[in-house]
Amino acid sequence: MFSLDFLSRSKTVFFNIFLFFVFSLTAQQNLVPNGSFEEYYSCPTGNNLNDGQFERCKRWWSPTECSPDYFNVCNNNINGVVGVPNNFWGYQNPFEGNGYVGFIPVMVDGVELGSEYFRTELFFPLKPCVNYHFSMYISLANYSTHGLNKIGAYFSKDNSFQLGCKQLIESSQVKYTGIPIIDSVNWTKIEGTFTAEGGERFLTIGFFDEDIDTVFVQFSLGSYFHPYYYVDNVSLYEVGENLQQPCDFHLEIPNVFTPNNDGTNDVIDLSKYLDFIDNVRIINRWGNTVEILTKDNPIWDGNNCTDGIYYYLIEDEKIKTKQNGFIHLIR
């Protein structure tokens, strides 16, 4: 016979396990801000190229002069041109929420508008030698005449801008390589897992493959003569350390700087690394620590230090890396 005290303790244990399970599920954070394109500065109103409508979507922008389109339910009461579910490209309900993005990955003939891309800055830079899982949902717009594959996601450390609308030739970490997507009724999931090099801050979505001659399929006749896709529910989650291969992460630290207040090469700035590394110690030739760089103190300006050779030391168990070298301070 079970006592009431035993039942009470069992309920407490079960409840604690349940709370731990719920916390584990909710602790993981989607690193992509506004991944379902719900948030906007103002409601989109039109579809003219570069009229500012895509820039109205919070936290996203175009890395080239060609702009995607932003669709939201809020436009239904204005003109419906960039509304949801009806808009100038067809009819589609969001995968979730009230908004989505539309873009031309690449023109069939490679001219005219060229390729469109859209980019965001992740909540946190990626950790080296850690696996991440990316996913998004896409659907072909009704008025498209062609389908496409090889749409992907490229994670970069820099936020470069390219003039014009030419294709970005980059090695995307995630790429859809199945049959060209021509489903305009349902949403197709594109996903993949990759190992980060470390320090990647920006996510760019688009077409990155150099071969554009073998990825198209024409399934209807029309005046648009190219593929146009809606995109929704973009996500990126950390899924754990890569245990299959050794970590080969190396920080790029300048070996000389000139803190003379001329505005050029005045400091050593390691802020892009100190989001995922605990600290970097700066040591003089006598072995004394003169500076400890951390996330809250990522810049060494050489104050109170004389000209000469200094050394940096990194020992971080989280990413299992050790690195040292010298920095020459010249005023």
Image (cartoon, grey):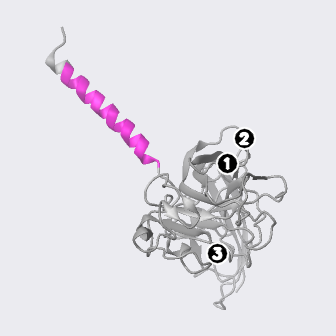
Q: Position of residue 197 (x, y in %)?
A: 69, 54
Pointer 3 and pointer 2: residues touching (CB < 8 Å)?
Answer: no
Label number found at residue 195: 1
Residue type of the residue flagged with mark 1:
Thr
Q: Position of residue 305 (x, y in %)?
A: 62, 79
Residue at x-position 60% and y-position 53%: 138
Earlier-in-chain disc, 3 versus 1: 1
Between disc 2 and disc 1, the foreground one is 1
Q: Is residue 208 above or below residue 70?
A: above
Earlier-in-chain disc, 2 versus 1: 1
- Place residue 127 in its image quadrant: bottom right
Q: Nearer the viewer, residue 174 or 155?
A: 174
Mark 3, residue position: 268
- Place residue 15 in its image quadrant: top left
Between disc 3 and disc 2, the foreground one is 2
Q: Secondary structure at mark 1?
A: strand
Residue type of the residue flagged with mark 3:
Ile
Query: In this view, which residue lies farthest toward the top?
Result: 1
How many C-alpha atoms fall within 10 Å of the one at disc 2: few (<14), some, or many (≥20)? few
Earlier-in-chain disc, 3 versus 2: 2
Q: Position of residue 220 (x, y in %)?
A: 72, 54
Task: State whether residue 169 appears in this view.
Answer: yes
**What number of labels is visible?**
3
Q: Secondary structure at mark 3?
A: strand
Mark 2, residue position: 245
Residue at x-position 72% and y-position 48%: 180
Between disc 3 and disc 1, the foreground one is 1
Q: Is residue 247 above or below residue 89?
A: above
Q: Nearer the viewer, residue 180 or 116?
A: 180
Magenta span covers which residues?
7-28
Pointer 2 and pointer 1: residues touching (CB < 8 Å)?
Answer: yes
Residue 15 located left or right of residue 203 = left
